[in-house]
Every structure is written in structure tokens, then in C-alpha cells.
Image (spheres, grey):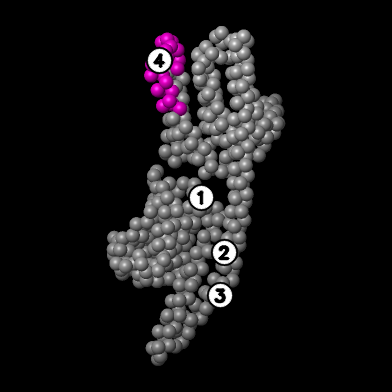
């Protein structure tokens, strides 16, 4: 019990400290994974640029002793090692977290401060300049102004201490104190300016996210409404037409042909209605593979065309836009297989690997004519959708199943 009580007290103290710094809502990027990944990518690239610049400064006409050279090399090696690890995480597809960026910022402050101390304190040539991009990155990632002010205050106190204690200190006769004050003031100015721009951009993002969530809720409501009303009505109409076909028999071939065409049209309409119904699951948070599997099953039930889905790899976290776009591509390909290709069997594949996502639909129908691209807007729209994902569309007029194969490949 005493340990639990202590643990509770520490947690309460931490929560109070977080509240004092404006971190209770933790606006640290968890609600914006794409934005966090973008910030991480820019930070990694920026640190590679700084690393190359430091390597050049270290190797080109060095004017310091062996001891300082070794210290600089060790500091730079630490930066390159950690930045390389972050780069590896990005390349391997593992989602970044704000903890890693916070550790990178702490490492930046430690290395810059150590470099300034080794370089004779205040009289160093340019080490204080490296504080500014690190602070700018921190201000862009963390939304709390109080946290940023606290951070820059701690860093400026460390830098002032190094300037006063290490080396020759500051020369009041040369008015070094004014230079020191200007450097510290610029630290605050950089942090305040970047934080203001970041807060403004985050507010815009939050408003856009709210609008998108409202649209998603509307889409879900529409999909449920279609399922409960229109889809049920079309299903009953189709059953009535099939019953009329049985009653008509073979006595009137023209009537039978007309009823058959109407029945096929009703099945096609039912299939088209499945798109807004099944895509609603994606807006509710369903995975793409699960939503497609249900969609393919519905396709087989409605059209009586044998359909099977094959998935390889583990589906990564995908945005709603990516999932809905790939879902629509699969739906359009299935529609073409049913309406135009006269397929009796369709295979749908969804492949995930470390580099890309591949969605393919292949049927055993009649394939595609040579002028398929100029007929209607279906394939043109599919190609535009694939390019919007940063990928491309591949079309085989005669695939391995005998009919056409349509493949969309997009970067993971």
C-alpha cells in the first residue's frame, strides 16, 4: 500500500506539471499521425544536412587540437547514429512517436551545449547557431506555448552558464553581454514565431479534421439509410421480377427475355447500392481487408458470379482516404467484370509488403478490347484515383485467368 500511495502521488504530481505546461490534452501528434510522420521526415532530412555540414567543417582546414577534434567527432557520431536509427524506423514503415522526436531534441541540446563548452564557451565561433533549428523543430511539434517558453528558458540558462563559466567568460569591456543577450533573445523570438505559425496551422488542421469527421458521419448515416430503405426495395423488386420469370415460363420468349434483362438490371442496381453501404464500414474504422471481404461476398450473392479474395501480408494503419479509394477501385473493377466481361469467376487480391500496397482484380471473362481506354470514363477515373494515392494502374487485357486483370499499386 505505501508503494501504491507513492506511485499515485508521483502520477498526480506529473499530471499537475503537465497541466501547468498546457499538456493535459497532449496535443503532441497522436491525433495527427500523418503530420507527425511529416515532421519526423523533415527533422531527419534536416539533421542529415547538418551532419554533412559538420563533417565538412570538421575535415576542412581544421584549426584545433587533437583532443577537441576527437570530442567533435564523438558528438557528431552520436547525432549520426540516432538520426540513422530514426531514418531506419521511417524506412521500415514503423510509425514514429513524439517520444523519439523529444529524445532527438534533447540530444540536440546536449550536443550543441557540449560543443559550445568544448569550444571555449562564449568565444566559440558558431555553435550557438545550431540551437535555433533544434528549437524551431521543437516549437513546430509541441503546441504548448508554456512548454516552449519553459524549454527555451532552460536552454538559455544552460548557454548563459557556459558563456560565463567556461573559457574566458564574457568581456564587459567588449560589451559581450549585449551579444549574449541578443543571442538569448533570438532564441525566444525563434521559438515564439515558429510556435505561433504551428498553432495557426494546427487550428486549420483541426477545423479541416472536424469537417471531415462530419462528412464521415453523414456518409455512415447515408449508407445505413440506403441499406434500410432503397436497397431493401430494389431487392424486393428483383425477387418480384424473378417470380414473374418463373410464372411466364417459356410460352412467350420476348417476355422472358425482357424479364431476364430487367432482372439483370435489378441485380446490377443492387450491386451499385452495395458501394455506399459497405464503404460506410471504412468510415466507421473498419480495415480495408475486412470491408473488401464483405464486399466480395456481397458481389457473389447478388450477381451469382463466383468471387474469392486473397490477402497477403499484414494491413498497416491506413488513412480513410487511402482505404476508401482502394475500395472504390475494387468495386469499379468488379462492376466491369460483371457488366461487360461476362466473367463466371473473379479473383481479388490485396497484397501488403514493406514498400507498397497492391490491389488486383482478375476475371475469366472475355477480356478487354483494344480500345477499352477510350470507352467511357471508368478506366480513366480509376487511373486518376491510383495516381492520387501516389501510385499507378496496370491493365492486362488478357490476364492469367483468361480475362482482364486490373492492378493498382500504391506506396505504403
Closer to the camera in the image, 171 or 17: 171
For numbered disc 1, what is the local secondary structure?
loop
Tags 2 and 1 touching, CB below 8 Å: no
Tags 4 and 3 touching, CB below 8 Å: no
**Residue at x 47%, y 65% (from the top left corner):** 298
| Furthest residue in direction bottom, as rendered | 251
The verdict on residue 308 being magenta is: no
Which is more N-terminal, label 1 or label 3?
Answer: 3
Nearer the camera: disc 4 or disc 3: 4
Q: Which residue is label 4 attached to?
A: 62
Closer to the camera in the image, 234 or 336: 336
Q: Which residue is label 2 attached to?
A: 223
Q: Which residue is label 3 attached to?
A: 233
For numbered disc 4, what is the local secondary structure?
loop
Q: CA distance from mark 2 to mark 4?
A: 69 Å
Tell me which secondary structure the magenta stretch mostly adopts: helix
Q: Specify the segment rendered in magenta.
A: 50-72
Nearer the camera: disc 2 or disc 3: 2
**Residue at x 55%, y 25% (from the top left corner):** 131
The answer to whether 321 is drawn above or below residue 194 in the figure is below
The verdict on residue 56 being magenta is: yes
Nearer the camera: disc 3 or disc 1: 1
- Quarter of the N terminus within the rendering: top right
Q: Is residue 22 visible?
A: yes
Q: CA distance from mark 2 to mark 1?
A: 19 Å
| Furthest residue in direction front, as rendered | 174
Nearer the camera: disc 2 or disc 4: 4
Expressed as whole percent of the image width and height from the top left, the position of residue 212 reads 59, 54
Q: CA distance from mark 4 to mark 3?
A: 82 Å
Amino acid at each position: 500500500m505505501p508503494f501504491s500511495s507513492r506511485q499515485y502521488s508521483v502520477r498526480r504530481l506529473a499530471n499537475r506539471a503537465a497541466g501547468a505546461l498546457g499538456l493535459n490534452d497532449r496535443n503532441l501528434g497522436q491525433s495527427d499521425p500523418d503530420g507527425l510522420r511529416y515532421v519526423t521526415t523533415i527533422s531527419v532530412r534536416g539533421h542529415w544536412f547538418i551532419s554533412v555540414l559538420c563533417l565538412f567543417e570538421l575535415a576542412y582546414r581544421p584549426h584545433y587540437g587533437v583532443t577537441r577534434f576527437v570530442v567533435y567527432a564523438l558528438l557528431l557520431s552520436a547525432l549520426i547514429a540516432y538520426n540513422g536509427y530514426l531514418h531506419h524506423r521511417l524506412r521500415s514503415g514503423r510509425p514514429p512517436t513524439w517520444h523519439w522526436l523529444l529524445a532527438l531534441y534533447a540530444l540536440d541540446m546536449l550536443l550543441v551545449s557540449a560543443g559550445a563548452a568544448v569550444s571555449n564557451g562564449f568565444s566559440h565561433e558558431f555553435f550557438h547557431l545550431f540551437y535555433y533549428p533544434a528549437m524551431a523543430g521543437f516549437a513546430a511539434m509541441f503546441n504548448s506555448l508554456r512548454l516552449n517558453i519553459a524549454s527555451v528558458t532552460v536552454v538559455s540558462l544552460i548557454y548563459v552558464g557556459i558563456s560565463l563559466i567556461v573559457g574566458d567568460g564574457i568581456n564587459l569591456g567588449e560589451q559581450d553581454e549585449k551579444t549574449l543577450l541578443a543571442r538569448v533573445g533570438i532564441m525566444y523570438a525563434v521559438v515564439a514565431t515558429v510556435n505561433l505559425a504551428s498553432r495557426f496551422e494546427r487550428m486549420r488542421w483541426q477545423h479541416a479534421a472536424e469537417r471531415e469527421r462530419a462528412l464521415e458521419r453523414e456518409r455512415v448515416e447515408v449508407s445505413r439509410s440506403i441499406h434500410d430503405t432503397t436497397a431493401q426495395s430494389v431487392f424486393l423488386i428483383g425477387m418480384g421480377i424473378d417470380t414473374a420469370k418463373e410464372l411466364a415460363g417459356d410460352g412467350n420468349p420476348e417476355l422472358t427475355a425482357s424479364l431476364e434483362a430487367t432482372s439483370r438490371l435489378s441485380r446490377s442496381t443492387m450491386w451499385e447500392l452495395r458501394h455506399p453501404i459497405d464503404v460506410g464500414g471504412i468510415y466507421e474504422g473498419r480495415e480495408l481487408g475486412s470491408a473488401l471481404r464483405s464486399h466480395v461476398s456481397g458481389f457473389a450473392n447478388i450477381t451469382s458470379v463466383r468471387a474469392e479474395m486473397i490477402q497477403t501480408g499484414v494491413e498497416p494503419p491506413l488513412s480513410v482516404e487511402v482505404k476508401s479509394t482502394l475500395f472504390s477501385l475494387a468495386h469499379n473493377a468488379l462492376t466491369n467484370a460483371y457488366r461487360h466481361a461476362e466473367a463466371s469467376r473473379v479473383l481479388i487480391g490485396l497484397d501488403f509488403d514493406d514498400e507498397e500496397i497492391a490491389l488486383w482484380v482478375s476475371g475469366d471473362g472475355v477480356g478487354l478490347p483494344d480500345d477499352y481506354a477510350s470507352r467511357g470514363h471508368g478506366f480513366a477515373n480509376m487511373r486518376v484515383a491510383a495516381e492520387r494515392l501516389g501510385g499507378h494502374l496496370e491493365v492486362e487485357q488478357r490476364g492469367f485467368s483468361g480475362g482482364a486483370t486490373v492492378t493498382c499499386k500504391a506506396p505504403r
